[in-house]
Image: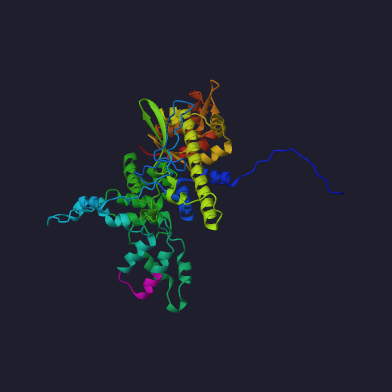
Amino acid sequence: MKPTLVLKMGQQLTMTPQLQQAIRLLQLSTLDLQQEVQEALEANPMLERQEDGDDYEGNGDGLSDSGPEIDASSLEPSRQEPDSNYEGTGSEEGLEEADWGERIPSELPVDTAWEDIYQTSASSLPASDDDEWDFTARTSAAESLQDHLLWQLNVTPMSDTDRLVAMSLIDSINAQGYLEDSLEEILAGLDPDLGIELDEVAVVLHRIQQFEPAGIGARNLQECLQLQLGQLPAATPWLAEASQLVRQHLEALGSRDYNLLMRRMKLREEELREVVALIQTLNPRPGSQIETEEAEYVVPDVMVRKHNGRWLVELNQEAMPRLRVNAHYANLVRRADASADNTFMRNQLQEARWFIKSLQSRNETLMKVATQIVEHQRGFLEHGDEAMKPLVLHDIAEAVGMHESTISRVTTQKYMHTPRGIYELKYFFSSHVSTAEGGECSSTAIRAIIKKLVAAENPKKPLSDSKIAGLLEEQGIQVARRTVAKYRESMGIAPSSERKRLV
C-alpha cells in the first residue's frame, strides 16, 4: 500500500474552551458560582468586581448592575442588554483636600461621639439595652452532644476511675442520645489493670442518665421514655399509668391497638387519651435537642413577583456576581507589542472577556428558562400545588430553542423565590396521569390532593390507600392503589394503621 490523499466531507462538533467554560458555569449552583468567580478574580488581574455606585461606560466587557426584568405573560420576553462597564477608573484620586476638610472638622465639641463623625461597623450592632440580643448565640460555634455531656461530667464529683468509665460511655452515645455499645463492650475497651467490674460501669451509666437532656444514655426506646417519666414531678397527672404503659404495653401503643390497651390497663377512652397525651410530650430522640450543625440557607437565583396583575421574573442581583474588566490594566495592552508581558496581559484580557460573556450567557439562559416555567405554572402561583400542570424538560427545551441537557443543567441546584416559598426549578417538572375526561394531571397535584385528603380524614378511621384511590377516581383522576402508596410514602405519610389515634 502506498500513501494517498483522500478528500472527505463530514460534520464534527468541537468543544472550544469558551464553550466548555460556559457549560461548566451553567450547571454551577449559586455558592459554587461565587467560589468559581473568586478563583477567577485571584487568577486574572484583568477581572474585578463592580461595586455599588460605580458608573462605568464601555464596550460591553462588564455585567450590568441591574438585571433584566421579564413579564411572564408573554411567550416572547423582551431582553434587556446589560450595561457595559469597560472604561473609567472609579477611583477617589480626584478628591481635593478641601473636601476632606468639609467632611471632618478640625475642632470637635467635647461631647461629640465617635459615631457622629466616623462610620464604623459597630453601628450595625443593636443597642446595649436590647434584651433580645444574644452575642454568643450568633458568634459561638455549635456545641456537640458529647461536649454538652462532658461539660456536665466536669462539674459532677466522682473518682478518677469512674470519670474514665463515664468518658467511655459518653463516646458511645450517638447523635440521637442512645448508647450504641453494650456495657460488656465498653468494659472490654477499658484498661484491665484498673480492675473495673461490670456493675461499676452500670452505676456510672445510671449517673450519666441523670444528665440533661432527659433520657440521654438509654439503651432502647423503652428505657429512654422511662428515664424521662422518672424526671417528671411526682404530682404529674397520669404519671403512674404512663409509666405502666411504657413498661408493659409499649408494643401495643406502637401498633395503636387502643382497644387492647383499654382492656389491659382497665381505662376508659378519655383516660387513655390523657395517658397517651402525656407520653407524646416525651422526646424519643433526646440527643436531637442539641444542635450540632449550623442552619444552611438557600439563596434564590430568580425572583418572581406579581405586579399589576402580571407575573414578573427577575434575577436575584444579590446572588449574581457583577464583574468587569479593569480599565486601567486594559489600557496598558499594546497591540503591536510582542513582548512576554504584553502577551500575558493580552491573553488575560481575552480570558476575562470570555468569562464575563459566559456569566452573561448563564444569566440570559436562566432568565429564559425561568420565564417559561412561570408562564407554564401560573396556576401553581395563583392557587398552589393542586393547580400544578404536568411539565417535562422537552416542553421547556422546545419553547426556548435549546437542548434538554441544557435545560437539565439550568434547573439543577437553581432556586426560585415565589410568593408561596422558595422552590428548586426541578420542582416544577413532574410526570402526568390521565384523567377521565382525557386530560392530564400532574403528579405533584395528586400528591397535594392526597395530603389534603389525609389532613381532613377521621383520625379514628383513617383513609386506606384503596379508599384514597377511590376518592381520586371520583374527581376524575385514575390512579392505582400502589401509585397512591408510592406517593404517600414519598411525602412521609404513614399507613392508615399507623395514623389511627384517639380523638
By what rule are the colours in the image chosen?
A: rainbow
- Looking at the rendered image, the quarter that the C terminus falls into is top left
Residue closest to the eye, 129 or 177? 129
* In the rendered image, the vertical position of residue 63 relative to residue 285, given as above or below: above
Which residue is pictured at 38% across the width and 68% down the height?
166
Above-or-below relation of 485 to 94: above
Whether residue 99 appears in this view of the structure is yes
Which residue of the protein is positioned furthest toward the front in this rendering? 336
Res. 126 visible in picture: no
Q: Position of residue 95 (x, y in %)?
A: 29, 50
**Which quadrant of the figure has residue 287?**
bottom left
Give yes or no for residue 172 being in the magenta stretch. no
Q: Nearer the viewer, residue 104 or 463?
A: 104
Q: Residue furthest right?
A: 1
Q: Which residues are magenta?
A: 156-165
- Left or right, 61 with reference to 157: right
398 shown above or below 59: above
Query: Residue 467, how many percent across, how many down?
Result: 49, 30
Percent coordinates x, y for residue 208 in the rendering? 36, 64
Q: Is residue 116 above or below residue 493?
A: below
| Main secondary structure type of the part rendered in magenta | helix
Q: Could you tell me residue 228's position as x and y percent? A: 34, 55
